[in-house]
Image (cartoon, rainbow, N blue to C red):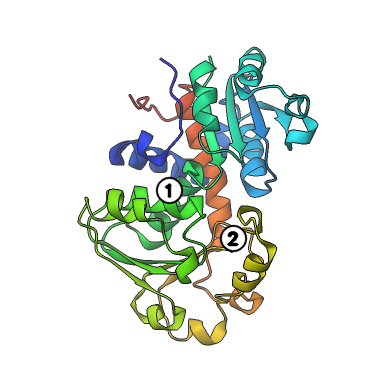
Amino acid sequence: MIKHVLSPLDFSVQELEDLMDLANDIEKYPDKYAHACAGKQLATLFYEPSTRTRLSFESAMLSLGGNVLGFASADSSSAAKGESVSDTIRVISCYADICAMRHPKEGAPLVASMKSSIPVINAGDGGHQHPTQTMTDLLSIRSLKGSISNMTVGLCGDLKFGRTVHSLINALVRYPGINFVLISPPELRVPDYIIDDVLKPNNVPYTECTELEEAMPKLDILYMTRVQKERFFNEEEYLRMKDSYILDRAKMELAKKDMLVLHPLPRVNEISVEVDDDPRAAYFKQAQYGKYIRMALILTLLRLSGAVPMELPS
């Protein structure tokens, strides 16, 4: 049976732990996995611009000894001629063994998975989900903090349209002792369905605030996000809110000595470059972890485990 990854909830907590164990082993012993995907092809179908996600998928497959094909924008694919996602994936299934898809429309990877004869990985669909970024975030937290449980996580910026935020909340509520601080302007607060369908039913404590300075001393993790211009229909509204929160050295002085700063990137100006040298700034290391978790995911979905035997998630 083909396994697709459309949401971080497609893996149980134990399956995620196994995936992260494999990613950590790849980090330590990359040579063990250098030929694990020899003869395999990854298709990267990116209907939306991307740097880290697309290149980390490509780097992951190449580092496993496989090959990559695909396109980096809808304009350079037959989508520009009107081809449907369903038809595209049927064709790509003839050429590749596994596919990573990013699309501006929510649910497009789900549609693709229903017609695909190869595993489909959702690499981001509109403001909906971004499961491999969430897996990257979880691996970063576990690797750098030693655990994912019992911590206060601040999510700051665009909590309304931020698919990375929505995916991360969905994933973290399954771990014990998680407490959220949701920091945003009122216009960009987390959607009601996240509160009503995810936080409240799981009895996860959360607070909402508009001031980053107020939240800083409480946090074990600060997850910064940019205000996404591409999600706004009104340029004036974007310009009004894009500089709502800027993390700088002065704000970092309010934080715990072992707090981690994460960011899915790209950043615009929401984290000052003066923060980059702070040992708590982990966002570039986070990007590196993204490659390792995607290598582990590719191996798992292709039922190729390199040197480490793994069970395929059901």
Percent across and percent down for residue 269 are 65, 71
Q: Quadrant of the N terminus?
A: top left
224, above or below 9, in the image = below
Percent across and percent down for residue 17 are 34, 42
Image position of 233 (left or right of 128): right
Residue tagged 1 = 167
Mark 1 is surrounded, within 10 Å at the Cα level, by few (under 14), some (14 to 19) or many (20 or more) other residues, namely many
Q: Is residue 29 visible?
A: no
Image position of 22 (left or right of 311): right
The one nearer the camera, 256 or 124, is 124
Disc 1/disc 2 C-alpha distance (Å): 20 Å
Amino acid bearing label 1: Ser
Quarter of image, res 24: top left
- Which residue is rendered at x = 27% and y = 52% of the image? 175
Q: Secondary structure at mark 1?
A: helix
- Which residue is rendered at x = 40% and y = 41% of the image? 8
Amino acid bearing label 2: Phe
Q: Residue 227, labelled with which disc?
A: none
The one nearer the camera, 308 or 184, is 184
For marks 1 and 2 on the same chain, the one whose residue lies earlier in the sequence: 1
Mark 2 is surrounded, within 10 Å at the Cα level, by few (under 14), some (14 to 19) or many (20 or more) other residues, namely some
Q: Nearer the viewer, mark 1 or mark 2?
A: 1
Residue tagged 2 = 284
Percent across and percent down for residue 107 are 50, 34
- Which residue is rendered at x = 73% and y = 32% of the image? 71
